[in-house]
Image (tube, rainbow, N blue to C red):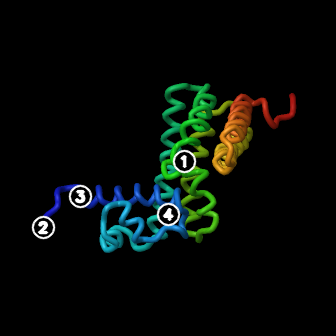
Amino acid sequence: MRYATGHKQKTRLRILEAAGRCFRLRGYEGTGVDALAQEAGVTSGAFYGHFRSKTEAFSEAVVGGLGQLKSGIEAFRQAHGQGWVAPFAQFYFSSKRKCDLSEGCALPSLSPEVGRSGSQVRTAYQGELLRIAETIEAGLSGDASERRSDTWVLLALLAGGTMLARAVQEEAIADEIAAAVQEATEAVAAGRLGREPS
């Protein structure tokens, strides 16, 4: 049986999307190849036709998920210019925090899983994280060292704030955490946080 042109690529993409959802929801150890294949609507054999191992699929899912964050930042920069951080933070701490965990941002969802992974996954993660950092840095004001420092603070606030807000039971506390971290994010971008007065 012959498949239409692009069928293999579409199937691979479908498996990667399914892997991203499964790993976000259940973590690396809580997700087996059979579950990934089932989520993607393929057989386990078909999974191995596209990926040599679960680790390879995880690594690519991490890179793809972080790539989505980078694209989102680029879109907000394009739409809002120099004032992009405030609307991005508002979106991030509302829509991306409250959506189903399987559809959440890869930064808070998958970073802890990457921290428990081997060097192959960590190297892939680092490369994509640096590309995100460059995208953020280019959209901030100040000198190069300030922009770099602020970039890491912003990424830590996005990931840490989301993880804390998702982890608590009471929605009122989650909202309080999200609001405080969102405000801190905007303060960093505006140069009002963590700098000695000149």
Label 3 crowding class (10 Å Cα cut-off): few <14, some 14-19, many 20+?
few
**Label 3 secondary element:** helix
Residue 8 position in % (x across, y down): 26, 61
**Label 4 secondary element:** helix
Q: Looking at the image, is mark 4 or mark 1 earlier in the sequence? A: 4
Mark 2: amino acid: Met
Q: Looking at the image, is mark 3 or mark 2 earlier in the sequence? A: 2
**Label 2 secondary element:** loop
For this view, does 116 lie left or right of residue 69?
A: right
Q: Looking at the image, is mark 2 or mark 1 earlier in the sequence? A: 2
Q: CA distance from mark 2 to mark 1?
A: 38 Å
Say which residue label 1 marks: 105
Label 4 crowding class (10 Å Cα cut-off): few <14, some 14-19, many 20+?
many
Say which residue label 4 marks: 59
Residue at image point 75% right, 30% down? 191
Q: Residue furthest right?
A: 197
The answer to whether the residues at label 4 and label 3 have Cβ atoms under 8 Å apart is no
Give the vertical position of 20 relative to 198 (above or below).
below
Mark 1: amino acid: Cys
Residue 55 position in % (x across, y down): 49, 70
Q: CA distance from mark 3 to mark 1?
A: 28 Å
For the C terminus, which image quadrant? Answer: top right
Say which residue label 3 marks: 7
For the N terminus, which image quadrant? Answer: bottom left
Q: Residue 1: which disc?
A: 2
Q: CA distance from mark 3 to mark 2?
A: 12 Å
Mark 3: amino acid: His
Q: Looking at the image, is mark 4 or mark 3 earlier in the sequence? A: 3
Residue 41 occupies quadrant: bottom left
